[in-house]
Image (cartoon, helix red, strand yellow):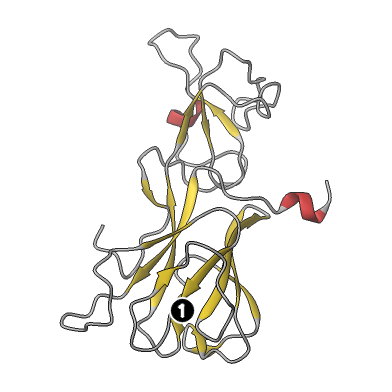
Amino acid sequence: MSEHEKDIAVPGSTFRLIPESRDGEASVPEIDHFEVGEGVSFFRAARGEAPRFEQSRPELDSNVVLLEPVIHADDFRLLLVNPEEAEIRINDQVAPHVILLRASDQIRINFGSPLEVAVYNVPFIGKPPADLVGETCPLCRLKITEKTRVFRCPYCRAGLHLEEGDDETALKCAALSPVCGGCNHPVQFAEGYLTKPEFSDE
């Protein structure tokens, strides 16, 4: 597998930019987060204006940054490309022209309110997609079949058995282990943030 093939959009998980809430500050939007979609997104954050995503490709200027979600080596990253004229800070440090962000990083564009990067996950539980059929569950080492119900780890994309029923033969690997056998990240069945954002009330 080439390096390029390892960088893919994050299915089941989305990046969110969460604005810091500051009571009485008009520049902060009436929104709890911005959802970063698949592919390249154009995010505008001009001084004195509420930040927003552009619906179509805009003229690139110092107020527009490019964002693209990627996963690489079992880690969620958000690629940010900023125009050279923009005043962008990441975690209060001047940002380079291109940077890979992680969950909990904070972005400040053109001295606007800070935005926190977060990863929101909707767990995959159900019939295995074609790429998991025939793969091995990292916990029990048995093959995943088309009839198997699985939990898919959002980090390493491994499938763990999560069969239904009280039958002794029903494989419930994901329910029996607190961590994924493929990457040791926690098994989380509930929809929500993979790590709790500082700026979120959830």
- Rendering coords of residue 166 (x, y %): 38, 10
At x 68% / y 55%, what residue is drawn? 73
Q: Quarter of the image holding residue 113?
A: bottom left
Q: Is residue 144 left or right of residue 32?
A: right
Residue depicted at x 61% and y 84%: 83
Residue at the left extreme? 24
Q: Is residue 148 above or below residue 40?
A: above
- Image location of residue 163, percent across then percent down: 47, 18
Residue that numbered label 1 is attached to: 107
Which is nearer the eye, 119 or 58?
58
Question: Quick one: quadrant of the C terminus?
Answer: bottom left
Q: Residues within 10 Å of mark 1 (few under 14, many from 20)?
A: many
Horizontal side, residue 194 vs residue 19: left or right: right
As rendered, which of 35 and 139 lies closer to the eye? Answer: 35
- Residue at position x 27%, y 65% in the image: 31
Image spot of residue 114 (x, y percent): 38, 80
Q: Say whether residue 132 is left or right of residue 31.
A: right
Task: Give the mark count.
Answer: 1
Closer to the camera, 22 or 48? 48
Q: Amino acid at mark 1?
A: Ile
Position of residue 189 relative to residue 81, above or below, is above
Note whether 161 is above or below 91 in the view shown.
Answer: above
For the point 61% across and 36% down, the residue is 158
| Apparent side of residue 98 relative to residue 163 in the rendered image (left or right) | right
In which quarter of the view is residue 68 placed? bottom right
- Give percent across and percent down for residue 27: 28, 82
